[in-house]
Image: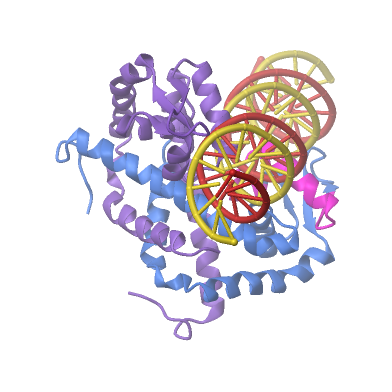
Chain colours: A purple, B blue, C red, D yellow
Amino acid sequence: MKYKMGVMKMERMTQLDQQLCFEVYKASSNFTKMYARVLEPFNLTFTQYLVLLVLWEEDRLLTKDIGERLGLGTGTLNPIISRMIAQGRLNKEQSKEDKRAYIISLTEKAKAEHEPIEQAVAEKLISCNFMDVNAITLMKNLKELNAFFSGMDL
Amino acid sequence: MKYKMGVMKMERMTQLDQQLCFEVYKASSNFTKMYARVLEPFNLTFTQYLVLLVLWEEDRLLTKDIGERLGLGTGTLNPIISRMIAQGRLNKEQSKEDKRAYIISLTEKAKAEHEPIEQAVAEKLISCNFMDVNAITLMKNLKELNAFFSGMDL
DNA sequence: TTAAACTGCATCGCGCACGATGTAAACGAA
DNA sequence: TTCGTTTACATCGTGCGCGATGCAGTTTAA
């Protein structure tokens, strides 16, 4: 089901996109809030949790790599990493191959937190029947949307 | 298509929700960036644009009403409104019925901007073939998700 | 080889976004 | 009426999120 311009009136499209951008905006804020509550006992923000997700998947990444995977620039990521180092969750060492680059790695503390944190998140989702929403279809459509965005350089 | 706990393994669910929250996060950031570029010539941020959308729909609202419609608290909304007053886009007057409340209204400048701004947004969407994404289904699912969020008080 | 372009990171300033706290006004029950 | 509670805003501190700028290290091309 694709819509070509000319088939849909501009007015109708404008209304749709307004609603869509607003629903996405609210969904994101809702997710952030829900995760914030779950993560608060661990002294973690949502974005810090995203950094951990990336590193739990693959440890010892360059700052640049983390930024690419999360879609964050250095101006955002650097303060986050600094705080997480201060929390004793991350290590930072200069790369020998490229002295400009820094390797970010998990501390033992952060590795040990992996299971408890995932457990807490999962319990939260179960407790509020999160899967009553049609998560599969939603995610499929969101991926399509994000693929679209990544394909435009404007 | 609903999923009951027990049907889906916890591990699988945790993975799904991780991906989902991340896709929503990226979609929101992508929208914000796209709108930021379109709105920049008007000296408007995305959130300020959302405030205008609400007031174009219904002028002369209380701060509280705008906050409810956007899901924003006073700590977020107040600075935004202040900036928009400084920009000459909004007026603020004390309500006579309730001296605690303030009525926010559009200036003539902000009213006059309605058409040009919508035009700019629409042109952008057309120019990048935005409607190639399955926007209708996506929005339907997002509304379902947001309704779910609004129904839980945790 | 050396100058120019590029890359990875640090820093800054602005604008949200949110919870916490404070204040004045309105309201409700005793 | 009066006092406690609730409500509408204001203010503050923290943490993103982003573009812009600066710099050191790397790569490239002449």
The reply, left or right, for residue A61 in relation to residue A77 is left
The reply, left or right, for residue A147 in relation to residue C2 is left
- Counting from the top left corner in percent of width and height, residue A59 is at 34, 29
* Residue at the far bottom in the pictured view: A6
Magenta stretch, main secondary structure class = helix
Q: Residue drawn 30% across and 56% down?
A: A140
Q: Residue drawn 31% across and 23% down?
A: A114
Q: Residue drawn 64% across and 64% down?
A: B38
Report the span colored magenta: B65-92
- Counting from the top left corner in percent of width and height, residue A117 is at 34, 23
Name the quadrant of the C terminus of chain B.
top left
In which image quadrant can residue D8 be found? Answer: top right
Camera-side residue: C22 or A66?
A66
Camera-side residue: D17 or A142?
D17
Name the quadrant of the N terminus of chain B.
bottom left
Note whether residue B108 is visible.
Answer: yes
Magenta segment includes A40? no
Note whether residue B71 is visible.
Answer: no
The reply, left or right, for residue B64 in relation to residue A42 is right
- Counting from the top left corner in percent of width and height, residue B132 is at 40, 72
Vertical placement of residue B119 versus A107, above or below: below
Vertical placement of residue A86 versus B90, above or below: above
The reply, left or right, for residue B135 in relation to residue A11 is left
Camera-side residue: A34 or B124?
B124
Magenta segment includes B71? yes
Camera-side residue: A136 or A153?
A153
- Counting from the top left corner in percent of width and height, residue B147 is at 42, 49
Q: Residue drawn 77% across and 67% down?
A: B111
